[in-house]
Structures are given as structure tokens and as C-alpha cells.
Amino acid sequence: MRLKQTAAAIMAASFISLGGITPALSQTVYAEEHGMGAALPDWIPSDYASALSFRNTYGATLVKDGLVCVVFREQTKKANKGEPDAAPRYEVRTTEGMMSELTHKTYSSDEGAFDYEVVVYYAPEEAGEFEVALVDTWLKSSSLDLGYNHAVAYYSFTVDKEMNITESDMFSWLPDSITEYKEFVDTSGKVAAKDDLVVFCLDSNAGTPYQWAERSQDYTSCFTHQTSVDCSMDTGTLLDGGAIRTIEVYKAVKDGSTVIQWDFSPCYDDYEEPQAERTLIADCTVTNKAQKVSLNGSCLQNLQFRYSSISLYSEDLTASAEAFYSNFSEPATAVITSKKELTYFLSTYLNENALKAFETEYSDSFFKENVLMLSTYLDPYRGRVFKHGLTGAYYKDGKLNIDYASVVSGTRMRTSYFDILQAVVPKKDYDGSEVVWNDKEVLGHDVKRISVIDEDTGKPIEIPYDSISGLFGYPGTVIQGENPYYWTVITAEWLDLDINKEYLPEGCILSETKPREIINNGNNTAEIIFRVKNTAGSNTAVKKYSALTQGLFAEESMIAVLKDCKPEVASSASELNDILSKYITKNYQKDLLNTYDDAFFKDNVLLLDFFIDATGGDKISIEDTVISDKGITVYYNKPAPDFNICNTDYFFILQAAVPKSDYSKQKVSWSCMGDTNGDGEFGVADLVTMQKWLLGSSDTKLSDWKAADICKDNTIDSFDLVMLRKKLIEINRLEPKKYDINAQYLRRSGDIYGISTAPEATVITSTRQLESYLNKPLDSVIYSTLGGPDQTDKIAKYDDDWFMAHKLIAIPFGEGSGSIGHEVTELTSDYVTIERTVPQMQTCDMASWDIFIELSRDSRISDDFKVIVQNNLVGL
């Protein structure tokens, strides 16, 4: 209800012409004539419809023609049931002796959400302040005075010596109507500052899974929240949904600097995690004894963030999952200004069908008004990151920075995604600067990340795979991962987590300076860091390359490169260069040459081994280095391809650094841990050899006693056999088997599950189990779409004969709206991925769904089969 310029007085009676000049009446005269019975101006509301129009145009007040018109919005209920005299709920109070009341009426509608009380004042008697307030008499308070701390609405006006009236409260410039809101955003933007106030203009739609929420860290040292103003359009009838326009106002209280932030995020699930699509940020500086607020104008307020996720095991990508990790692990970015540029950028990653589907979101008309910024993201944890959210966008040092947060889950899934991050910016707000994407990675709610790091390098150390329970005192089902570890825990027991130093790798001791550190991130998440000192006398590393990598090998044929492959020792950077040149080209030598420079070789020698692996290489690691006067043996883990044959071969360079003081050109050998039969790999054959040797078979010998001593107690016995079997199971854990998708999506009629968007799967192998799942006989279940045809016949085929050759996976969903859709996008023996499509505009009907996935009866399904739900928000 910003201040309106006082209109020129309008003649209320016949004009008297004086030499062609028509004198105008003053505001006071004009107002007084109304007091003597003249007709009220057209702009003053005279019925419910005009009061509604007044509120939507001017807000609550308008000063014009010497009149002050106030339109109060009130709850429709007029009397408290407990009041015997049916006293009016609301009372208008004003400054006594300042202005006279010209008219006072209340307009109601049976269909409207509010009543409107219209009061017009005129003829100020003296200069000064005129205050008016609407008081709710149902509020029992003894301090209702002209300060109006308890008033429903309060406005003030100033009368000068010439009896001109102007509004003097914040609403003289602050919008309180839909018309003023739009004008304010057009001229001042969505974040603005005036005097000691900061204003946020928030727009959204009712009935959608999004809401604005304040995400500020702490601004209370400089600001206090002053008020909230509803600028949404008033309507004559109650509406289901509609646009919401709200203004949040903050008042400075102390000089200083701070940031106030509002995020537009989904509210249906885990909204405490950063998943914002839009942010509004006020980077404020308060000066002049809290009377002046200045904003840093570098923040970009009109950027909209979204992302698309494509499973690495889907058919939508141009290469395999391993090829993507080999070639596209680093993010690629682009600023897109046309569909042609979009096609060129995405064709590297997406196949034709997926590319066309992506492009439908961005038409030629879109690029006339907007610029599209893209960045690729490949989950570095291979199954822990499924969500991203915007945290801010701003210009700094001549670059546009887009800050986002990737949410790291405590549970690792057996799939990962290739994400395309997108930022839409109006052309008028983009100055052509270089765009920099910054990942402000956060942990998911309740997740604690536990890292055991080398205090010298800051990198995680190698820890035996079977030591988690001994290391922390919790089983692997509670604390998961492979350093770093992840622990999802609600209670405060994580604060007491400690490490058992007896289970650290040989040669590692806890740091004496800072063995344990806890970094509390808030949101019940934390980083727990244990620092250790490596005293073993050697450091190791493993380098892995896809054998399909273009230009990797020094020879055209990989076989030609490896025919003379043998362990090597480098004692200088030049020797290392000569050794690497036998195997790989210069472009791929750089990382190793940069790691091992002259400073490294001053005190160390580098032991190297080279080989090809066909299992995917995830389990290959160096376990130990044994140094003696007679020789040096490096023990590594390398599974035999008994089960895990990978489509892609990998070339490995194993590295072990040994102090020069321990190296006297003695024989260097590399031995596979668990390799009891001497074939250079660890598999089922080694387990058989070990068992036969323990049983005393005369024709069985162990090729390397140290490789067979899994317990590291210098004794070969049945305990080593048990540990060997555990090691075999761990490194040959079967990868998930992928199945074709054949699913039915059926909506129950009459049965409501309630809201359930994180369901569990039920494997069904008989009609009896199906009826148990449905909790009723098959002939009493009804499936149909809302207002659509009966679909119950679609489960009729699930009879005894059908189950002789098939099985079902049943997954129930309970949704708050029938407009939310589901689609199975990936199905394996270990998990199913379901895309849950959530439109911004939704129907109000609850819905219960059964998803039936059909499989052959002999299909392998894991005991810990998981349902992965990916939310896809559309209609933005």
C-alpha cells in the first residue's frame, strides 16, 4: 500500500469561469463537501466486489482527494459463541481528535474467505500523526493502546501544516496487494533494501510439493524478523490452489555484516537437506547505527536449478558404466544459447532417444529469453549421491559462481547415476562471464562419515576388509563402507565412537598430536576423523586404466606391450620415465612423473609391477611390503576371474615406495595374497590347494607361505583357511544380474495405504502369498483409475498355473495425490529403481498403488533386495 500522489481536487459543484481560468478546490474543501453529503468518489468501495478490487489494487490504504480510505480484511466469523451479547469481534481504534469519520461499512459474501471493513476519514483538525488500528477483541490483553502491538493491522499518517495527508508507516512504499507486489518486483527485484529494512518477495503455488523456507545460518546479531505480508490476490470465492505472493521483512538492529537466505525446496521428503531449486540471498552490510542497509549486488536472484539423472546401467548412455568412470569422471561444463549447442554438448553422453527426450524441455522460444548452464556430475562414491540442491549463485572476480550441494547418503546402492546439472538464467541477468560450478558436498540427514587418514598425506589408509567390527566395535551392518565409512545413527552414541588400535594395519599407530577429531556439521551429521602415523617404511598406490582408452599404450597392440612385462625398480625420475615409456604414452605418464619427482627419489626407490585384469579391478589393492636383507616382497590382492568377468579389461600399475636405506639391490618380487598355488591370482583353486595341504596331501605344496598366512600370525592353520574362504566370498561377491522390465501399475479402488513413498518389496511365488500380500481374496480386490475402467482383470492371470513358471515382486505406494506417477526404470537381482514423477500442480485425491513386476520363477533375487525411489519433479 505504497503512498499515492494526492490527486488534483475535482469540482463537486458548478464551475465559475473567470477569464477562461477554472480555479481548483483544495483537498480540504473537497473533503469537507463530502462531509456535507456530496457523493463519494468512485474509488471508495461501495460493495463487496469493489472492496475486493481495492485490496488487490491498493492494499489496505489509499490517500487521495483529501480522504484516507482504509479497507481492513477480517475473518468472516463475527461473534464469539461464548459472548452472550454477540459483541463484534473487531474494533477500529484511531487517534482521538485528529480526523473525522466520513463513512464506515462492512461488506460480506457467503462464498468469500474474508469480510472487508471500509472506513473513510476526512477533515484533519490539526497537524500531527493520525493512527488507525484494527483490534481483535477476542485477544485478551491489557496493553492494547495506540502502539498497537496486539492489533491485527496498524497504519499511520502524517498531516502537515497545510493539512496535506501522507502515509508515514512502512506501507507507504511496501506492497500489500498483488498489483503493488508485481510493480515492486519489476522495479526493485525480489530482494531489496530501504533504510533499515530488507525485503524478500516470495512467489509459489499452493497445492504443490514446494515451499519457501528460511535457510539463514544466523543473522540475529544484526537483524530481527519484522513482519510477513500476504500479497496474494484476494478472491470472492475459496480456491483450491492458486498463486501465493508473500513478503518477508527484516529490520536492522546493529551495525555489521550478515547473510539472510530463503530457499525454494521440495517439502515432500527430507526437505532439511539442501535440495533448493531457487535461492534468494541478501548479503547485507548494516551501518549508521543500524539505520542504513546496503546489499551486495553480486548475488543472482533469478537462477533456477534442476538436474536430470540417468542410470549408468541404462541404455540411454553412449558407453558402459566403467567407460564413463574412466572417461567422464571429471565434470564438463557449457553455456548453452541454442538447441544446436545443446545437441552438440549432450551427444557425447546421451544416445539419440535420450537426447531427444532431454531436448523437449528446451524449445527455441526458451533460448530467446534464457541461457542454459550445464555441468555433468558422476557420483564419485559409486552409489551414494542421488540428490543435489542449489545453495547460491553470485558474480565474483569476473566469474559467475553456481554453488550447489550434492547429498551423500549413508547407504550405498548398487547403482550410480550420471547427472546433468542445469541452471536457467534470464538473458538480461547474464553478462557473458565464465561459469564456475562449485560442489558444496553435504552428508545426508543423520549420516556420520568416519575417515582413518594418514596424518602426513591426509589421505585414507588401506584397512583390511574384515576389520570393521574390531576397528570400531560395531558390526558392518551398522557401519558401512571401505574407509571412509558411513554410519546413519540418530542417537548421540556416535560422540563416543573410538578406534581400536589393535586392528589398524601393520605399521600404523594413532597420531600423538591429534588422533581423533569430530566436526559437527549440524543437521545431526558429522565428520569423524582418526589420524594415524605410518611407520611401516613403505607407501603404496594402485593406478588403473581402461584397456579401451584411446592412445594409452606405447605400442599399437596391448599384447605387444605386455609380452615382456616384468616388475621394475626406479631409483630416479629419469629411470621412472624410461620404464613407463615401455608401457604407456607420455600423456598418461604425467600423473606418475608428477607424483614421484626428484625430491621423492632423494630418499626412496619405487617398485613397480604391471598386469591386465579382467574382473573390473575394484578389489585389487596392495596389502603389505616385507623387507629383508635377502629380498623385498610386495603382497597384493588380485582375484581370479572365477565369477566376475568384466566386459572391459584394465591395465594396472602397482607402486610401492621403499626407503633407500632399506634397498641394497636385493631381489624384488610381487606376490598375490592368498595365492597358494602360485598362478598369480587368488581364487577357488587356492582354497582347494590350502585345504588339501592342511589335510596332509603329499603331492600338495604351498607356493608362498606368507601369502597363505592370512591371519598374519606366522602360522598356517585352519584359521587361515577360514579367513581365506571369507576373503574369497568378499572379493567374488556377485554383481547384480540385470533383468528386462515387465511391470503393471494398478491403483486400488477403496483401499488407502496412507502416505508411503519409501516402500519395501515383497517376493510372491504363489496365489496364496499374493492374497496374503493383498490382505484379501483375489476376487474381492478392485483396481481402477479414478473415474476410469475397471482393471481388476489384469491380476486374474496370476493363478496357480502362472506361478508354476513365474514369480512376482510386489511394491506398494501410498500417495497424497493421484496425479503422482511411477515407472520402473531399472531391475536387477539386488535392487529395483522406480522413478516417481511428482507434478508441481497436483490433484487432491489420495491414491494407493500396487506395482507388480513379473519375473521367471528361476530369477535370482537377493535376500536384501532394495527399492530405490528417484523423485522427478516436473511442471516447473
Image: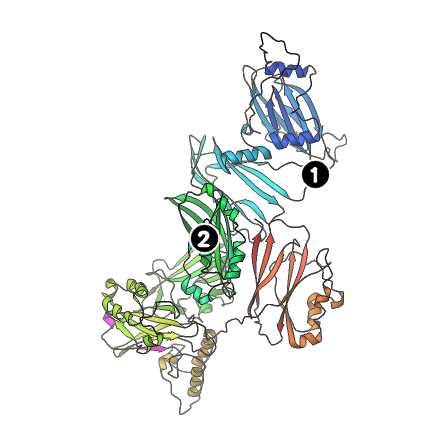
Q: Is residue 823 above or below residue 802?
A: above
Residue 593 visible to an observer of this rendering: yes
**Res. 38 image quadrant:** top right
Q: Is residue 367 above or below residue 749?
A: above
Residue 406 visible to an observer of this rendering: no
Distance in Å between CA atoms under marks 2 and 1: 48 Å
Q: Amino acid at mark 2?
A: Glu
The front one of 265 and 525 is: 265
Q: Which residues are magenta?
A: 659-684
Q: Is residue 546 magenta?
A: no
Indicate the secondary structure of the residue bearing disc 2: helix
Q: Quadrant of the N terminus?
A: top right
| Residue 137 in picture, x, y percent from top left | 68, 31
Which disc number belongs to residue 277?
none
Circle 1 sits on which residue?
237
Q: Is residue 671 magenta?
A: yes
Indicate the secondary structure of the residue bearing disc 1: loop
Circle 2 sits on which residue?
341
For label 1, count other residues whose C-alpha is less than 10 Å away and answer few (under 14), some (14-19) or many (20+).
few
